[in-house]
Image (cartoon, rainbow, N blue to C red):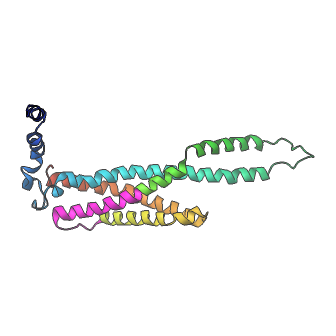
Amino acid sequence: MVKATATESKQIDWTLPTVALLAPFFMQVNESMAKGGELGILEGRSAALLHPIVMGSLFVASLYSAYLGYQWKRTREIVDEVRDMKRMLPAMVGDVRPPSPLDAQIVAKEAERKVLLEGKHKDKHFAMGSILLASGVGIAIEGAANTYVRTGKLFPGPHLYAGMVIVSLWAFAAALVPEMQKGNQTARNLHIGSNIIQIGLFAWQLPTGWEIVEKVFQFTSWP
């Protein structure tokens, strides 16, 4: 009995600290909600800011993915460039081929390709594209859902329409991957073109997104 009492005396009751920590989030829930507080913290500023924060990160990720895609494209192009240069080399004279100015260029391009291959840009581009597709579609839906939860309606306009096109282009670009892996150049061109358009729309969409963030701070409170 003595040992049990000693053990119990060493245990910490975390109830009071936990309540004290969470109390600010729930003491004045109705005042912090934009619509009425029926759904609690989901109507507050914290949930409303999740969409713009993640989308801002995904815009940067889109630029990085484009860079990786270009590097992988460059890696493939060097193979064709080296092959074309080798075709232009002087013909063999017996067992010896006369030296050519192209020799140094071929060596330089092969060294460049080696460095690019070491960067594993293909794998990184695929991984980043997968993250963009999964996270982007999910957070786009979350943004519309959060707006409806807070206000009881959606606001059709340039920001919403551009977002719908961006999500569609993400899906379209991903759908082209199987054909791209087979070497289909048309699919590669469409993939590049669709992603250039979506990055352009993404950049154009940022100012309207910032206007919405300002309204979130105007009409909501923490949490």
Left or right, 204 with reference to 38: right
Q: Position of residue 69 (x, y in %)?
A: 52, 53
Which quadrant of the structure image shows residue 21? Answer: top left
Q: Position of residue 54 (x, y in %)?
A: 32, 52
Residue drawn at 9 percent across, 50 percent down: 26
Q: Position of residue 93 (x, y in %)?
A: 91, 46
Whether 162 is among the magenta residues is no
- Please state the extent of the stretch shown in magenta in the rendering: 132-157
Query: Which residue is more in the foreground, 166 or 5?
Result: 5
Left or right, 83 with reference to 68: right
Most distant residue in the right direction: 94
Which secondary structure type mostly characterizes the magenta part of the structure?
helix
The number of callouts visible is 0
Which quadrant of the structure image shows residue 198? Answer: bottom left
Left or right, 69 with reference to 171: right
Whether 144 is among the magenta residues is yes
Q: Position of residue 96 (x, y in %)?
A: 89, 43
Quarter of the figure with the N terminus: top left
User: From the viewer's perspective, is residue 136 above or below residue 222?
Assistant: below
User: From the viewer's perspective, is residue 121 above or below residue 34?
Assistant: above
Residue drawn at 22 percent across, 62 percent down: 147
Residue drawn at 54 percent across, 65 percent down: 178
Residue drawn at 16 percent across, 58 percent down: 43
Left or right, 83 with reference to 38: right
